[in-house]
Image (cartoon, rainbow, N blue to C red):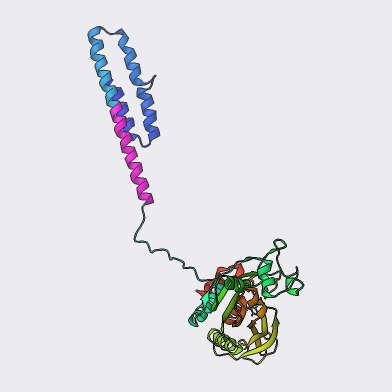
Amino acid sequence: MYHIKKEFEALIADAKTEEDIKQIKAKFLGKKGKVSELFKQMGGLGDEQKKEFGKNINKLKQYIEDSLTNKQTQIKEIRKKESLEKESIDVTLPARRGFLGSIHPITKTIIEIEDIFKSMGFDVETGYEIEFDRYNFEMLNIPKEHPARDMQDTFYINDNVLLRTHTSPTQIRVMESKKPPVMFISPGKVYRRDSDITHSPMFHQVEGLLIDKDIHFSDLKGVLSDFLKIFFGDVPVRFRPSYFPFTEPSAEVDIGCIICGGKGCRVCSNTGYLEVLGCGMVHPNVLKNVNYPDEYNGFAFGLGVERFAMLKYGIDNIKLFFENDIRFLKQFS
Ligand code: DAH
């Protein structure tokens, strides 16, 4: 019995893992283990001896069980300590740098445009990207046979529903829901079947509308000239007669080329000017369509946000806005 105890103590002292414990347990307390063997030896003993021997075996058994449990707890504790040490955080390490995102150049341009018009008293309204043909065309005095409705340009969802090709339907939406006077701009996404280095099938426009009594073309000229000079800096601004179905008279607005300073270059096709806006006095048919009283009139305008951003920041390919290459976007933080 003494040898068994010594053997056990040597093994348990060396035990390092739960697996070691399991094996030692089996070796001593298992069915064919050393302690069980001892019990078997009791057979040939007399009553008195048997009692004494049995007591001692039980004592040994208890001792082995207790030692195993103790050792197991010890091993568990060591494991825990080791894993805590491994997982511990060194708070003295230099912190990892946080990366800040930046505002997308299109959003940034829209915010700049909004801020200028807000400072003049314009509200900001939103429209719908999925529109009725009626709002995108008909109510804006664009009749059924107008080339702007060509299947080449418009993404139709069905005969009556489409992806808006411009932000102008917002004019109708706002005038239908608000009594005059109204004075707002409305930025948003528009869609056309068009794709090259200056055209993208989805792009952004900002629409503008001002309706009140006694509005003249000079009001339109004043507001848009001021806006362009604030946005682009002190550039020459010129108004050229043009045509839009929803305005009469209509004009396109040019600024002196900001790339070459008006000398003539590739960007301005050697004209010294860049076209940046469409505008005009709201067509009487449009005002009639929304049942505005006769004494009201006003002006409207529309501009392409990508074009404004490309000119202001010297970007030569519209695709750069939508690839979202972080090296490009980072420049606008
Ligand atoms: N909707 C026109 C376009 O997409 C832009 C435009 C021109 C809007 C003249 C207007 C305007 O409100 O008066 O090309």
Where residue 68 sits: x, y (%)? 32, 30
Q: Quadrant of ligand 1?
A: bottom right
Horizontal side of 81 relative to 172 (left or right) equals left
Horizontal side of 257 relative to 332 (left or right) equals right
Where residue 276 sits: x, y (%)? 63, 82
Can residue 267 be seen at all in this image of the molecule?
no
User: Which quadrant of the rendered structure holds the N terminus?
Assistant: top left
Q: Residue placed at 25% from the left, 18% from the top?
A: 56
Can residue 299 be seen at all in this image of the molecule?
yes
> What predominant SS class does the magenta segment belong to?
helix
User: Residue 61, located in which quarter of the rendered image?
Assistant: top left
Query: Compared to 5, does 293 lie above or below?
Result: below
Of residue 48 and residue 258, the one placed in the foreground of this image is: 258
Magenta range is: 65-87
User: Residue 138, located in which quarter of the rendered image?
Assistant: bottom right
Query: Compared to 12, does 43 lie above or below?
Result: above
Of residue 212 and residue 237, the one placed in the foreground of this image is: 212
Asked whether 303 falls inside the magenta stretch, the response is no
Horizontal side of 222 relative to 140 (left or right) equals left
